[in-house]
Image: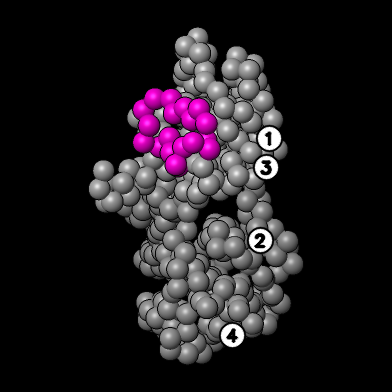
Amino acid sequence: MSPSQNSQHEEIRLKKLHILDIVDSSPEKEFDDITKLAAQICQKPIAHITFIGSNQLFYKAKVGIEHITSSRVTSFCTHLIFHDEVMEVADALLDPRFEKNIWVTEPPFIRYYAGFPIKIDNYTVGALCVLDYVAGKLTKEQLFAMDILSNQVVKLLELRLTNKDVNQRILDSQHQQEHLQKLVRSQSKILSYVAHDVRNPLASLRGIIDLNERQLLSEAEGKNVMGLLKMQLDATLDTLTNVIEWGESQLKRQIPHIRAVDLFKVVSKKIKNFEVATQSKGNILQHNIEPGFQVVADEYLLRFILRNLLTNANKFTSNGTIIVSATRSANKALIQVKDNGIGISDKIFNKLFDPQNRVTNPGTENEKGTGMGLLLVKEFIEKLGSKLEVISKPGVGSEFSFSLPIPD
């Protein structure tokens, strides 16, 4: 076998050994029993089941020695890698391969060795061995019995692989069940949001349209109703957008795609998108984030969080100022969305993140809301490993903040 073939053979052999996950494993009675039986059948003081690594040998089971590992360089078993059958050394002192081996010339002064290859897919991963302090030779009956025992070790290893595969399948099945259960919970939550936060407003809109079609409203009332209709539609569309994006995050983005994100670019784009909405309420929207300022986050989740926080700030602010800021503190960035709007009353504040009892105030222009946006913001911030902090005072304004890591 050429050097390149030898290298390729060794690479595959070590992969086979790695798959077994047996090196450095704890003692097992089945292997111990085979080793004891081998020593008894062959009438030898030393027996062991050894697995041959890249540099060392690991003794899975042993009789007559205390070693847990030994060097592959000085090992008799290393020579078994390319042996298909038993390798018997009747007298190590008379064998050129071993006459100067430290196991022979120094304690324990081994003279006899017989190794039976343990093969997986025709690759020798280990050996069942017996050793003695005196020269000798096994009988045909002993060789036959040892061959059976070495095959039994292979059966144990094959069973180990089967059990490993079964356990992995069970684990995969459990993960799939957990994933399906999570999808069912997500689906139920989406349906709940649609039923409560989308269907009800749409039903109200339908009622308003019916009144207008039946000409039961005066011209002045009709104009007023159309204004209300627009605000209701805006709120419903915003809610629907949140539901869709939240659903997408649950179904497609189970694990956030964490990476370095240019916060300056994300915030700048969001502010541009909000220009019309803020100007219509006389608000000034600005940020003080320096170009190139980066944070570690999922950009999709970050955009969702900022959109909802800006929507919320604009809703409760008229002729005021909304500022997005980011300040460094050690290896973290504190991100804040601050407004000088009407603030949050104590009654609303105490139920701000209660999904069962969502209560919201109308905006400065009677904009409707469900409180769902902030609940999802809190959930997404927690997905990023952070926490949403809220400071608010009625008549003064509100500040929403959270921290994200800064790239190294």
On screen, residue 176 above or below 106: above
What type is the residue that disc 3 sits on? Answer: Pro
Kindly give the residue lying farthest to the top in the view shown: 141
What is the spatial separation of the Cα atoms under label 3 and label 2, in whole angstroms? 77 Å
The residue type indicated by label 2 comes to: Leu
Magenta stretch holds residue 104: no
Q: Position of residue 277 (x, y in %)?
A: 41, 77
- Between disc 1 and disc 3, whose residue precedes? 1
Q: Is residue 230 above or below residue 57?
A: below
Q: Which residue bears the numbered disc 3?
A: 107
* Closer to viewer: mark 2 or mark 1: 1
The location of residue 238, given as percent across then percent down, is 43, 61
Q: Is residue 160 above or below residue 108?
A: above
Q: Nearer the viewer, mark 4 or mark 1?
A: 1
Let me know if residue 81 is in the magenta part: yes
**Which tag, 4 or 2, sits closer to the chain's start?**
4
Distance (Cα) linking label 4 and label 1: 64 Å
Please give the residue where the numbered disc 4 appears in the rendered image: 327
Residue bearing mark 2: 352
Compute the Cα span from label 2 to label 1.
69 Å
Image: magenta residue range: 77-97
